Image (cartoon, grey):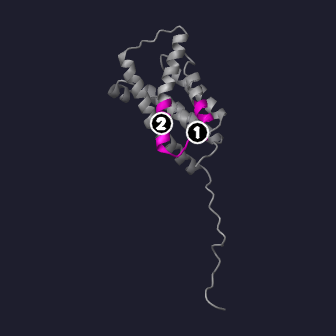
Amino acid sequence: MTHQMNMLDTVAVLMAAFLAVFIEASFSGFRNLLGAQIDLLPALIVYASLSSGVFTLALLAVWGGLWYDSLSVNALGVSIVPLFVVGLMIHRCRDLVLREMVSAQLALGLIAGAVVPLGTLLILFNSGAHPIIGMASLWQWFVMAVGAAIFTPLMFLLFDRLHRMLSYQQLPETTFRADRQIKRGRN
């Protein structure tokens, strides 16, 4: 079910990004259990890349990145470019991706969850910041990538269900009217 997102869907994606960043900042259950926080924005970027236009993708990257950076120790705006670049690359290849396949969603979620933190780290290094990196960083990177892979199919499920609930589903037309009586036999 490939569909172009309308304005209601764009608002829903932005609301989901706001809620995801808020939950990441306020709920430390995953961080305490796994030693790393799962980032939900790469999963949302994968969904928006395969289901929307570049406008929605750009809005999600800018606002999601700003919200994420404002509640983290990142410099403000450093997450925008990696989110947008990953989303744009997926968007450009979306005709080649089978959107409905869970394995494709998992693979793209894993790639996005791995590339976005690396891109952010690269920008931080190039901006003169000195982030602390050690062996634990590999574990955190792994958890972020796998977490994004797991949450990506859930994003598709959530938004496809929301789309079915809020949009008009056209009934297939038949060649016969429902109130038509069919007489059988010879006459």
Q: Secondary structure under badge 2?
A: helix
Q: Tell whether 168 sits left or right of 117.
A: right
Q: Nearer the viewer, mark 1 or mark 2?
A: 2
Q: Residue at x 43, y 37 (%)?
A: 150
Residue 123 seen from this side: yes
Q: As rendered, which of 9 and 93 lies closer to the eye?
A: 93
Q: Position of residue 74 (x, y in %)?
A: 50, 16
Number of numbered discs: 2
The image quarter in which residue 51 lies: top right
> Which label sits on residue 173?
none
- Judged by its main secondary structure, the magenta piece is helix
Q: Residue at x 60, y 46 (%)?
A: 2
Q: Residue at x 61, y 50 (%)?
A: 167
Q: Is residue 90 magenta?
A: yes
Q: Secondary structure under badge 1?
A: helix
Residue at the far bottom: name it: 187
The amino acid type found where label 2 is placed reads Ala
> Which label sits on residue 50?
1
- Looking at the image, residue 8 lies above or below residue 111: below
Q: How far, Cα to Cα, is label 1 from label 2? A: 13 Å
Region of the chain picked out in magenta, as a range: 87-111
The amino acid type found where label 1 is placed reads Leu
Residue 37 seen from this side: no
From the image, tell me which residue sits under label 2.
107
Q: Position of residue 140 (x, y in %)?
A: 39, 23
Q: Position of residue 81 (x, y in %)?
A: 59, 22
Q: Is residue 89 magenta?
A: yes
